[in-house]
């Protein structure tokens, strides 16, 4: 299977907290960062997720927001620090590559956001990803 999703982070399940409709899954990425995925409970059962299971976290570039630093008082649970490696832009949008301990993330943001945050190669950023925007895949 080929996917258009640019962000693929490999890790292992650390926790599974089931609910009637939704399940949260803690994942420790290879580089040591912890993230949370909120997936349907049906999907969690179909994937047979349990602590220690190998997974790949998948996140579309349009679901990655960027901040100039850690953000407090926000419901977004996944905040991954990194450094801007490159920016490719067009008229309205830009693709920002961010090197993180766990590899590389790509964020699709507006050109206005790039300018407002003063992003350039070498800039420190925090990638923000809602738990509901993290899909999980198993081998």
Image (cartoon, helix red, strand yellow):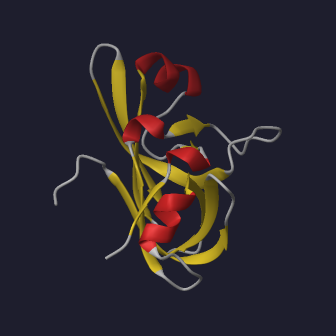
Please tell me which residue is depicted at 44% across the width and 56% down the height of the picture: 99
Question: Quarter-wise, where is residue 20 in the image?
Answer: bottom right
Judging depth in this view, the residue of 18 and 62 nearest the camera is: 18
The answer to whether 94 is drawn above or below residue 75 in the figure is above
Q: At which x and y percent is residue 84?
A: 45, 46
Q: At which x and y percent is residue 41?
A: 56, 59
Question: Quarter-wise, where is residue 139 in the image?
Answer: bottom left
Q: State the residue lying farthest toward the left.
A: 1
Please tell me which residue is depicted at 48% across the width and 74% down the height of the picture: 11
Please tell me which residue is depicted at 74% across the width and 40% down the height of the picture: 75
Q: Which image quarter is the N terminus in?
A: bottom left
Q: At which x and y percent is residue 133?
A: 51, 45
The answer to whether 116 is drawn above or below residue 74 in the figure is above
Horizontally, residue 72 falls left or right of residue 68, namely: right
Question: Do we see residue 89 in this rendering?
Answer: yes
Please tell me which residue is depicted at 68% across the width and 43% down the height of the picture: 76
């Amino acid at each position: 299977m080929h996917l258009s999703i640019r962000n693929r982070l490999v890790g292992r399940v650390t926790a599974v907290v089931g609910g009637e409709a939704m399940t949260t899954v803690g994942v420790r990425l290879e580089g040591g960062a912890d993230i949370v995925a909120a997936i349907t409970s049906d999907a969690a059962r179909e994937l047979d997720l349990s602590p220690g299971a190998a997974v790949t976290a998948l996140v579309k570039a349009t679901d990655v927001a960027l901040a100039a630093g850690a953000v407090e008082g926000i419901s977004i649970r996944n905040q991954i620090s990194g450094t801007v490696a490159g920016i490719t832009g067009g008229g309205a949008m830009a693709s920002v590559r961010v090197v993180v301990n766990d590899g590389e993330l790509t964020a699709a943001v507006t050109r206005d956001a790039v300018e407002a945050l003063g992003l350039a190669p070498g800039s420190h950023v925090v990638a923000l990803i809602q738990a509901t925007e993290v899909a999980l895949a198993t081998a």
